[in-house]
Structure formats: C-alpha cells, structure tokens
Amino acid sequence: MDEGELVGAARGGDRQAFDELVRRTFVDTFTLARRLTGNEEDARDVVQDAYLRAWKGIGKFRGDAAFSTWLYRITANAASSSVQRRRRHRAEPFADDFEPADAAAEQSVSQGAESAEALDRISAALDDLPAKLRTVVVLKDVYGMSHEAIAEELGISVSAAKVRLHRARRKLRDLLYEEGVQANAV
Amino acid sequence: MRCDEVTALLPALVDGEPVGFEAERHVETCLRCQAELARYRRLLRTLSLLRSRYVVPTPGLLADTLAVITEATEYGARRTLLSGRRLAYAGAIGGSALAAGATAVVLIARSRKRALSLAG
C-alpha cells in the first residue's frame, strides 16, 4: 500500500495501517524530535506523544499536505509542549546563555561546511542553543517550514518567530565562527 | 551605516528579506560584511544538509511507541464504555423517577375525582 492508501485506511480507524505509517516515518520523526529537544530522553517522550496525537487526530487530517509534513507539525507542537513542561519544573537548561565559541568548530565549518565533522559540530551547536531558539532554527533552516506554520505550531506571532530565528542564527554563527565582525569598522 | 549595525541585519538579509536600502548598499561595498554574509549562507547550507542526516532511534522505542498507542486506545475505549454505562444507569434512574412521578400524579387525580364525586 502507498502512503495515501495507508492514510485513508488509518483515517477509517485501521490501526494496522497507522502502525505501518509509524514504521515508515519513525526514524525521520525521531530525528526531528531529537533535533528539537537537544537530547535523547526528551526526544523519546516527544516522539511517543507525537504519534499518540497523530493517531487521535488522524480523522481530522484532510490530506492537503503530505502525511510527513502534518507529522512534523504535530512533532513540533509536542516538542513545544515538552519544553514548556520542563520550563515549569526546571529553569536552568533554558537560560539564553551558552558556552562560548569553539575554535575547533569554527575551523571545521570554515574549512568545509559539508564535511561529516562539520555536520557533527553544527548538530552539537544546535544542542547548545536555548530550546526556544533551537526549535525555530531547526524547523525553518533544517526542515524548511514556513514562518507562518512555525508561528502557528508554537503559538507565537510570525514576527516573533522571525526574531527568534535571527537570534538563533546569530548565536549559531557566534558559536561556530571564532572571529566576528569588528565593531565600528568601515 | 556602520558594520556592527549591518551585521545585526545579516541573519534576515541571508533569506533575502528587505533590510533597507542603506544596509544593502553597505554590504555591496563592504568586504567584511560580504564575508560575514557568506558565513551565514554557509551556515544555512550546512543546516539544510542536516535534514537528510538521520539520528538512529533508541532500540525498542518503536515497539514502545506502538504499545503506548495501544494502551491509550484501550484506556479510551474503557472510558467510553464506562461513560456509556453511566449514561444508561442515569437514564434508568431518571426513567424510574419519571414513572413514579407520573403514577403519583394519576393517583392524586383519581383520589381528587373520587372525593369530588362523593361530595357531589
């Protein structure tokens, strides 16, 4: 069965069809959850929550977008809820401060952004970002979601989503490149 | 405009968002800001490559996830059943009360009728 047929069957309550959709999308969804949360433990909870929400809401899925896109949005929403829950219980991991630039990371990225090591470095840098900023930059710059979709899933305005994105990019840039632009020059 | 003012706008400019004529003109003529913009472009290119770089899920997580859905579905079904039973009990009690009330009304009406006929 192709994805459309599976979605149709799952919408009709076919649990086996839904399970097959879970199997086909699982690695992708887990990867997104891992990137959004910055750690394995939260990613596990988010991925389970996301699929549970998807199963409960599959009847409302109209099929306007691909199933995977719909699932991305649910995962983003589940990750956002997870972050909010954690913020209520723990304050320290969500402070806006993080470790200063890593010279090795700068060298790696500047010498060849596409190398495996550079990807590892940028993944690590993403994990070091505050959760609010990481969520937006992952959804926009890694998964290509629109500002509007991001704003809707996170419950913020489009302009707030853009502000967070620009802050996240600046922080990533600071984290990955040793040298910045000197102030007052030119 | 100064470089530090323009630098703050580069994360938006890298998407092609309008940041103002002065800032755009500054970038056109400033090698330092051009280099900085190139860094942002490289950063975005690298980030987009992460899309196809998968993270291997923890062993057993898929099975656990399917089990969580099953559990939640069964729990939901039990709750639906319970609420259905509750509704049935409430309906039965309500029906009985209604029947008792109707019987009482009939009995009162009959006794009044009898009293009136005796008086008449």
Image: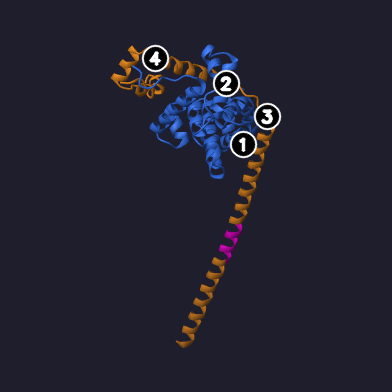
The disc numbered 1 marks a residue on which chain? A
Instruction: Give the Cα separation between the discs numbered 2 and 3.
Output: 21 Å
Question: Looking at the picture, how far across and down is residue B74, in whole percent?
Answer: 66, 43
Q: Is residue B89 magenta?
A: yes
Q: Which is more foreground, mark 3 or mark 4? A: 4
Q: Which is more foreground, mark 1 or mark 4? A: 4
Please report contact status of discs 2 and 3: CB closer than 8 Å, yes or no: no
Question: Looking at the picture, how far across and down is residue B2, in whole percent?
Answer: 33, 21
Q: Which residue is mark 1?
A: A45
**Tag on residue A121?**
2
Q: Residues within 10 Å of mark 3 (few under 14, many from 20)?
A: few
Is residue A82 something that shows in the picture? no
Q: Earlier in the sequence, mark 3 or mark 4?
A: 4
Chain painted orange = B
**B119 left or right of A55 in image:** left
Instruction: Give the Cα separation between the discs numbered 2 and 4.
Output: 24 Å
> What element does badge 4 sit on?
helix
**A38 left or right of B44 in image:** right
Q: Are both tags, 1 and 4, on one chain? A: no
The disc numbered 2 marks a residue on which chain? A
Q: Nearer the viewer, residue A124 or A66?
A: A124
**Tag on residue A119?**
none
Chain painted blue = A
Bounds of the magenta span?
A: B88-96
Kind of residue indicated by mark 3: Thr
Kind of residue indicated by mark 4: Arg
Instruction: Give the Cα separation between the discs numbered 1 and 4.
Output: 45 Å
Q: Which is more foreground, mark 2 or mark 4? A: 4
Instruction: Give the Cα separation between the discs numbered 2 and 1.
Output: 25 Å
Q: Which residue is mark 3?
A: B58
